[in-house]
Image (cartoon, helix red, strand yellow):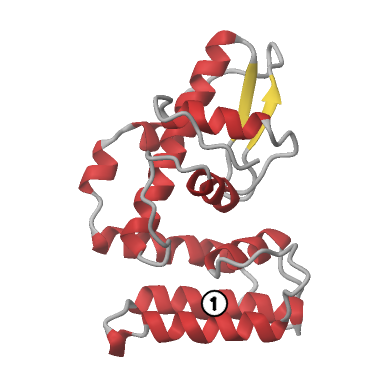
Amino acid sequence: MNDDLEPEMDLAEQIFVLLREQPDGCSEYELIQQLKARHSTHIPNLPLLDKLVLFRTHFLVFNALYRLRDQLWGETSHTVHISPLCVQLQPYVPGLSGIVENDPLRDYYLDLTNLRDTDEAEVERLLASFWSRMRGDHQGDRNEIWDPEQKRAALELFELDQEAASLSLHTIKRRYRQLVSIHHPDRGGSTTRLQSINLAMEILQRYYR
């Protein structure tokens, strides 16, 4: 569907429209691409390779998702599963659906000062923390199969579609070289970002070797 989203809708309402069209859900990256394709004016229409653009886009989408979930819980109509790897509209289930007390992620994304006050150094720290968690306890065992969520996160960092028929190790390596060229510190890039790209490549080589 290529119809533009209604500009008078806020971002949460636009996301609700998209999620209703996709009962099986989608990844955060796919959701962002759909918002751009449908000409949403609520997120930056810029490539996600710049770390501040990536953070700002991610924050705005998650802020809207948590606002949408709160609204739908209040209406007892739906709930929203919120994860970078799967965003999905789900039926409201009395007794199971409800705002969880002391939800630090919800508190973080609903506080817009975190969007305003997060600078480049903090974004670097967040990226390093994310990939440290993705590495988990597997880094010492080269023969162990990695979790599929790691594969999806790595492909999303590379902005590659895992369902594409053309996806191969050759394609991944070509994209890896492009990203290294863009983000190498010798060319003004970020060391932490380059480390993230290298780890993503390490993960993907396990699946596409």
Say which quadrant the C terminus sits in.
bottom right
Amino acid residing under circle 1: Leu
Measured from the top left, where is residue 173 in percent x and y?
Answer: 61, 85
Image quadrant assignment for residue 98: top right
The answer to which of 141 and 87 lies nearer the viewer is: 87
User: From the viewer's perspective, is residue 178 above or below residue 56?
Assistant: below
The answer to which of 72 and 98 lies nearer the viewer is: 72
Say which quadrant the N terminus sits in.
top right
Measured from the top left, where is residue 96 in percent x and y?
Answer: 68, 18
Question: Which residue is farthest bottom?
Answer: 186
Measured from the top left, where is residue 32 in percent x and y?
Answer: 51, 48
Image quadrant assignment for residue 92: top right
User: From the viewer's perspective, is residue 145 above or below residue 73?
Assistant: below
- At 60% from the left and 61% from the top, the residue drawn is 153
Q: Is residue 102 visible?
A: no
Q: Which residue is mark 1?
A: 199
- At 36% from the left and 50% from the top, the residue drawn is 44
Give left or right: position of 198 versus 21: left
- At 39% from the left and 81% from the top, the residue drawn is 182
Measured from the top left, where is residue 45 in percent x and y?
Answer: 39, 52
Q: Is residue 150 visible?
A: yes
Q: Secondary structure at mark 1?
A: helix
The answer to which of 65 and 136 lies nearer the viewer is: 65
User: From the viewer's perspective, is residue 145 above or below residue 40?
Assistant: below
Q: Residues within 10 Å of mark 1 (few under 14, many from 20)?
A: some
- At 48% from the left and 22% from the top, the residue drawn is 101
Question: Which residue is farthest front?
Answer: 3
Give left or right: position of 59 versus 162: left
The answer to which of 190 and 144 lies nearer the viewer is: 190
